[in-house]
Image: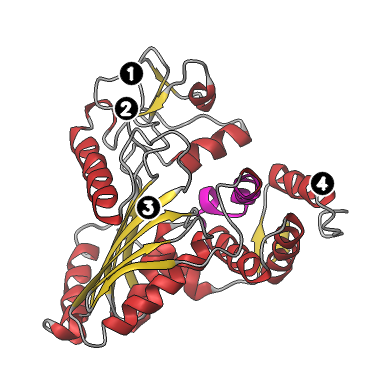
């Protein structure tokens, strides 16, 4: 079934307000999740609404919590999100960083105790659209130990995603948003919900045997996700450990194992560069154009660059989004449970 984007956003806003999210928070979450869905990132799309509701009810997200600046210089910023909604905290952080970039070549921001910030690509793409280059790291404050080391059987770290972006000519963006695990947890959860298999060499059961069954992560004892690169993913595992050490070390968050009673889903490190203080934005875009032309000409078959699908989807716009019947049923159930009356999922 296909639904108008604005209709879905309005429904999600209404639902989140009924659950007790602040109205502005509800609007920010609804727009963010719907954008991810429209751009084709279903693992971080509308299906995440159940997670946000559960996190609020469990006290892992606090509605109305204002981000608190702990330390600030002309080119750095440390923020305690105080369990605030990630889609509200991140725009506040970006606005602060952008104001500093008017006089600084680069600015580093660190955030701890933040609710889930959603798709990392959303924030680095925003930076690229503003004419900046960006690099973003996230860890789970030492909580979500689901990625095993190469040859190991139990999870010791999280999927610790990394995202980056470069502004290109004509308003386009070079960007990537990737897990340092072999697969993002959201994609495993989506496979479990839809009853589909996980791609090969991504997860293992508790005995360390490869499996494509997403239920393996819920077994007792649980299975684990392999590092980027699979069973021989030494480089991916090194990158994951680096993310934990860097993000926790600079933000004031935690590496695994988290202390008992820890809350707060995300700790964030972001570095943003203003090309105008280096060789200029025009130079960066010109070099990117030349390089992309080389990449595109290297094969007779189409070569798709990182971020290209997002560029195409963003420019195409589109007023409707296709949802699976399973997700439609879940949304209808949530609407009934929380009294968010709707007729859009009927008929």
Mark 3 vs mark 2, CA separation in Å: 20 Å
- In the rendering, at what x and y percent does residue 337 appear? 82, 46
For this rendering, which residue is in front, 34 or 62? 62
Q: Kindly identify which residue carries mark 2.
A: 148
Sequence-wise, the earlier of marks 3 and 1 is: 1
Sequence-wise, the earlier of marks 2 and 1 is: 2
- In the rendering, at what x and y percent does residue 245 appear? 23, 45
Mark 2 vs mark 4, CA separation in Å: 37 Å
Report the mark closest to the observer, 3 or 4: 3
Badge 4 marks a residue whose secondary structure is: helix
Q: Kindly identify which residue carries mark 4.
A: 337
Dots 3, 2 in contact, CB < 8 A:
no
Q: Residue at the far top: name it.
A: 207
Are there few (<14), some (14-19), or many (20+) residues within 10 Å of tag 2? many
Dots 2, 1 in contact, CB < 8 A:
yes
Q: Is the magenta stretch mostly helix, strand or loop?
A: helix
Magenta-colored span:
39-56
| 120 relative to 238, above or below | below
Q: Kindly identify which residue carries mark 1.
A: 153
Count of picture labels: 4
For this rendering, which residue is in front, 232 or 260? 260
Q: In this view, does 20 lie to the left or right of 344?
A: left
Q: Kindly identify which residue carries mark 3.
A: 267
Sequence-wise, the earlier of marks 3 and 4 is: 3
């Amino acid at each position: 079934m296909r639904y108008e984007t604005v209709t879905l956003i309005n429904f999600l806003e209404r639902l989140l307000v009924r659950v007790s999210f602040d109205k502005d928070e509800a609007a920010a979450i609804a727009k963010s999740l719907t954008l991810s869905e429209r751009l084709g990132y279903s693992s971080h799309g509308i299906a995440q609404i159940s997670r946000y509701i559960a996190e609020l009810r469990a006290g892992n997200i606090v509605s109305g919590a204002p981000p608190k600046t702990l330390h600030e210089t002309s080119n750095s910023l440390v923020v305690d999100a105080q369990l605030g909604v990630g889609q509200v905290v991140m725009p506040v952080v970006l606005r602060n960083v952008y104001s500093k970039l008017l006089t600084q070549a680069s600015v580093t921001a660190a955030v701890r105790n933040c609710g889930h910030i959603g798709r990392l690509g959303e924030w680095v793409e925003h930076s690229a659209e503003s004419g900046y280059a960006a690099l973003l790291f996230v860890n789970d404050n030492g909580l979500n130990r689901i990625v095993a080391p190469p040859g190991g059987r139990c999870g010791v770290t999280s999927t610790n995603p990394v995202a980056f972006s470069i502004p290109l000519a004509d308003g386009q963006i070079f960007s990537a948003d990737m897990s340092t695990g072999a697969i993002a947890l959201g994609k495993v959860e989506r496979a479990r919900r839809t009853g589909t298999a996980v791609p090969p060499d991504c997860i293992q059961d508790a005995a360390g045997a490869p499996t494509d069954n997403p239920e393996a992560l819920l077994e007792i004892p649980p299975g684990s996700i392999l590092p980027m690169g699979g069973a021989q993913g030494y480089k991916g595992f090194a990158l994951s450990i680096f993310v934990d050490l860097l993000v926790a070390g600079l933000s004031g968050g935690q590496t695994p194992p988290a202390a008992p009673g820890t809350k707060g889903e995300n700790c964030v490190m972001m570095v943003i560069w203003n090309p105008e203080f280096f060789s200029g934005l025009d130079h960066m875009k010109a070099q990117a154009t030349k390089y992309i032309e080389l990449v595109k000409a290297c094969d007779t078959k189409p070569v798709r660059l990182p971020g290209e699908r997002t560029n195409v989807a963003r420019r195409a716009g589109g007023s409707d989004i296709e949802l699976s019947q399973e997700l439609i049923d879940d949304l209808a159930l949530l609407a009934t449970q929380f009294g968010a009356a709707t007729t859009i999922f009927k008929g």
